Amino acid sequence: MIKTKHILLIFAPAVLLIVIIFWIRLAQYNLIFKKPNITQEQIKPELELIPIFPDDPVIGEVTAGKTVVVFEDFACQGCKNQMVLLDALRTRYPGRIKIIWKGLSVKTFPVSSEPAQRYAYCANQQNKFEEFKNLAFDNTDNLSPETLSAIVTDIELDTVMLEECLATSGPDDYVERNKQLAILLNIQSVPAVFINNEQVTPPAYVEGWETILQL
C-alpha cells in the first residue's frame, strides 16, 4: 500500500500547477498597470469627454447618430461575444450605430495579444481594420505571429506598407495611449463599454443593446 506521504509527493506538484494556471488565467483579463501618481479629482476634468483620436478605428458609418466606445482585446472571449452582438445590431439598424474601437491588450499568456493590436493599427491605416478584426476574433485563442501573418495574407494587406507602419512609433504609441486612458478611466477588465461618456455593463443579448441605445 502506498503511504500517505508518497501520495502527497505525487499529487502536490499537480495541485500546485493547477493553482498557478488558475491565477494566471485570472490575471489575464485584469489590467495590471502602474497607476500614475495623480488623484481621480485631478484627472476628472480631463475625462468629461472620452477623447476620440483620428487613428481610432471606426466600425460602421462615421455619421451614425449612436456611438459606442469599446475597449477590447482580440484575445478576450467576452470581447468577441460583444462584437458579435454589436455587429448583429449594426445589421439590424444599418447606418445608425458606429463603434469606436480602442484596442487594450490585457492577455500575456501563453502569447501576448499586443502584437495583434499593433497589426490592427496598421490594418486600419489601410482601411482594413474590420476585416482584420473579424479574423483576429476568429483566432482569439491563437494570436501567434504565424496567425497574424496568415490574417495579413487573407485580407490582402499591402505588406510593404504594413512593415513600414510597424517600424514607426505609431503602433506602440497607440497601444500605450489606450493603456494610459484605461488607467484614467479606472477600467478594471475588458470588454469595457462607454456610451455618452459613461461606462455601461455590456448586455448579453441584442435586445439589451436596443434598450440601452433606445433603438
Image (cartoon, grey):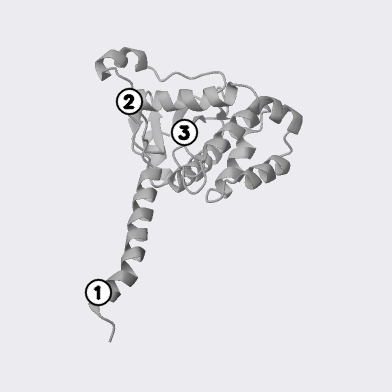
Three-letter amino acid code of the residue under disc 2: Lys
Residue 158 makes an appearance in the image: no
Q: Nearer the viewer, residue 60 or 157?
A: 157
- Estimate the x, y position of residue 35 in percent, counting from the top left: 32, 25
Question: Secondary structure beneath disc 2?
Answer: loop
Quarter that holds the C terminus? top left
Category of crowding for the residue at label 1, using alpha-carbon neighbours closer than 10 angstroms: few (below 14), some (14–19), many (at least 20): few
For marks 1 and 2, give the CA distance.
Answer: 46 Å
Mark seen at residue 24: none
Question: Secondary structure beneath disc 3?
Answer: loop
Residue, x 65% and y 31% (percent of image)? 123
For marks 3 and 2, give the CA distance.
Answer: 16 Å
The mark that comes first in sequence, 1 or 2, is 1
Against 166, residue 112 (above or below) is below
Residue tagged 1: 5
Quarter that holds the N terminus? bottom left
Residue, x 46% and y 48% (percent of image)? 77
Judge left or right: residue 27 versus residue 171. left
Category of crowding for the residue at label 3, using alpha-carbon neighbours closer than 10 angstroms: few (below 14), some (14–19), many (at least 20): many
Three-letter amino acid code of the residue under disc 3: Leu
- Estimate the x, y position of residue 166 in percent, counting from the top left: 64, 28
Residue tagged 3: 104
Picture quadrant of residue 70: top left
Residue 188 makes an appearance in the image: yes
Picture quadrant of residue 202: top left
Q: Are marks 1 and 2 in contact (CB under 8 Å)?
A: no
Against 99, residue 10 (above or below) is below
The mark that comes first in sequence, 3 or 2, is 2
Q: Nearer the viewer, residue 55 or 27?
A: 27
Judge left or right: residue 175 versus residue 159. left
Residue tagged 2: 35
